[in-house]
């Protein structure tokens, strides 16, 4: 197992280097002059500048951005900064990238971890129950609802829920993250934040119910058809033992990919939901960075997603061995 993990880590490093080089070179080949863009802002904010002062500022910006070096050298310097925790400088926010993403990352984790746990707590028992009661009135009703929920885009669900719960019932605010003009701490801050996050949480949970429920149901139906299930029932085992100890553990193998992907998704953010509800999350930050050509910030976030994907694939492979001893890697 250790040898396998080490080989996968080497593979992850190679993939990371290839993808980082591709993205860095692609973003640096996009037409545009970052020095001129930043210099224009400097000239606008500082009146009566001499030609020498403007030229000195241009040289300073060029050196700070590393544009006086060839592109391969700039890539190596940028990669070295990524490895040591220096993610670059955001031209749009006028501060280091690490300082830009701290707040949005915390907000994204706050909302996604609640939505993920709530969705899994509903979909797993519901999918198992529908598989056990396959063909029943309840199962058919759930299948119709999950198809409808799976087919409707998340932004449509968000708009409908805003109209019902925010406009008509006035249970939740339409957008925002906290009450304006209030300085809250402790539990009062948490309660206020949860009130503003309540509607986005409901939308995110509802939008994910359809796909996950159908996935769990299908995996459980396949497991319940196996010969070992008939054998377990013939031995006189209790139905709960057959379902949860035998069928569910084997059905978990295809489902575990989706489950781990969901948990890793708490770091990714949702561009649509965050923009719809005005949440300062990591998805909205990436969207704003792309719209404002803030490529240092975009590159840092893209490499973060690459790392999350690589680590997620490794965790999925290792979790397969924990769930099913037949596929454990011992050599």
Image: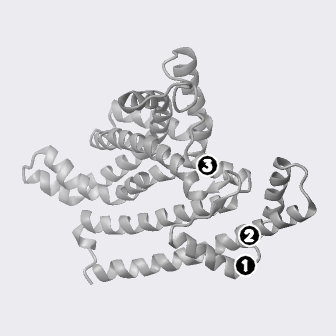
Give the labeled residue for mark 1. Answer: 71
The disc placed on residue 28 is 2
Residue 250 against residue 112 in the figure, above or below: below
Inspect this view and state whether residue 153 appears. Answer: no
Disc 3 secondary structure class: helix
Residue depicted at 53% across the width and 46% down the height: 104
| Secondary structure state at the residue bearing disc 2 | helix
Q: First in sequence, mark 1 or 3: give its number.
A: 1
Residue depicted at 35% across the width and 46% down the height: 217
The Cα atoms of the two marked residues, 2 and 3, are separated by 20 Å
- Toward the viewer: 223 or 308? 308
At mark 1, the secondary structure is helix
Q: Which of 92 and 220 is in front in this view?
A: 92
**N-term-proximal mark, 2 vs 3:** 2
Where is residue 300? Give x, y as percent.
Answer: 59, 62
Query: In the image, what residue occupies the spot 19% across and 55% down?
Result: 246
Front one among 144 and 209: 209
Q: Is residue 198 above or below residue 213?
A: above
The residue that label 3 is drawn on is 285
Real-space CA distance between mark 1 and mark 2, rounded to the nearest whole angstrom: 8 Å
Please give the count of numbered marks on the rendered protein.
Answer: 3
Q: In which quarter of the image is the N terminus?
A: bottom left
Q: Tell me the crowding category of disc 3: few under 14, some 14 to 19, or many 20 or more residues within 10 angstroms, Cα based.
A: many
Whether residue 319 is situated above or below residue 115 in the rendered picture: below
Question: Is residue 131 at all visible to an observer of this figure?
Answer: yes
Mark 2: give few (<14), some (14-19) or many (20+) Cα within 10 Å: few
At x 44% / y 37%, what residue is drawn? 205
């Amino acid at each position: 197992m250790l040898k396998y993990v080490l080989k996968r880590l080497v593979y992850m490093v190679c993939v990371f280097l290839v993808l980082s080089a591709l993205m860095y070179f692609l973003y640096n080949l996009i037409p545009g002059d970052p020095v001129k863009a930043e210099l224009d802002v400097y000239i606008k904010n500082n009146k009566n500048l001499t030609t020498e002062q403007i030229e000195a500022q241009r040289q300073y910006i060029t050196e700070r951005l590393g544009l006086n070096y060839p592109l391969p050298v700039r890539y190596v310097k940028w990669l070295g900064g990524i490895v040591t925790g220096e993610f670059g400088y955001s031209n749009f926010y006028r501060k280091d990238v690490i300082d830009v993403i701290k707040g949005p990352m915390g907000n994204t984790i706050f909302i996604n971890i609640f939505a993920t746990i709530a969705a899994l707590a509903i979909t797993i028992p519901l999918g198992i129950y529908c598989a056990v009661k396959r063909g029943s009135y309840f199962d058919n009703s759930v299948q119709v609802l999950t198809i409808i929920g799976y087919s409707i885009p998340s932004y449509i669900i968000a708009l409908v829920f805003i109209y019902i719960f925010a406009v008509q019932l006035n249970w939740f605010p339409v957008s925002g993250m906290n009450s304006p003009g209030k300085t809250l701490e402790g539990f009062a801050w948490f309660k206020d934040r949860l009130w503003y996050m309540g509607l986005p949480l409901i939308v995110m949970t509802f939008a994910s119910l359809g796909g996950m429920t159908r996935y769990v149901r299908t995996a459980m139906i396949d497991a319940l058809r196996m010969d070992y299930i008939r054998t377990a029932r013939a031995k006189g085992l209790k139905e709960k033992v057959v379902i949860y100890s035998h069928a569910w553990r084997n059905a978990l193998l295809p489902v575990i990919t989706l489950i781990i992907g969901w948990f890793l998704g708490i770091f990714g953010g949702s561009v649509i939901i965050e923009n719809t509800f005005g949440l300062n999350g990591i998805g909205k930050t990436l969207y704003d960075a792309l719209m404002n050509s803030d490529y240092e910030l975009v590159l840092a976030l893209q490499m973060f997603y690459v790392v999350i994907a690589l680590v997620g694939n490794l965790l999925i492979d290792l979790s397969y061995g924990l769930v099913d001893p037949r596929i454990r890697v011992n050599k």
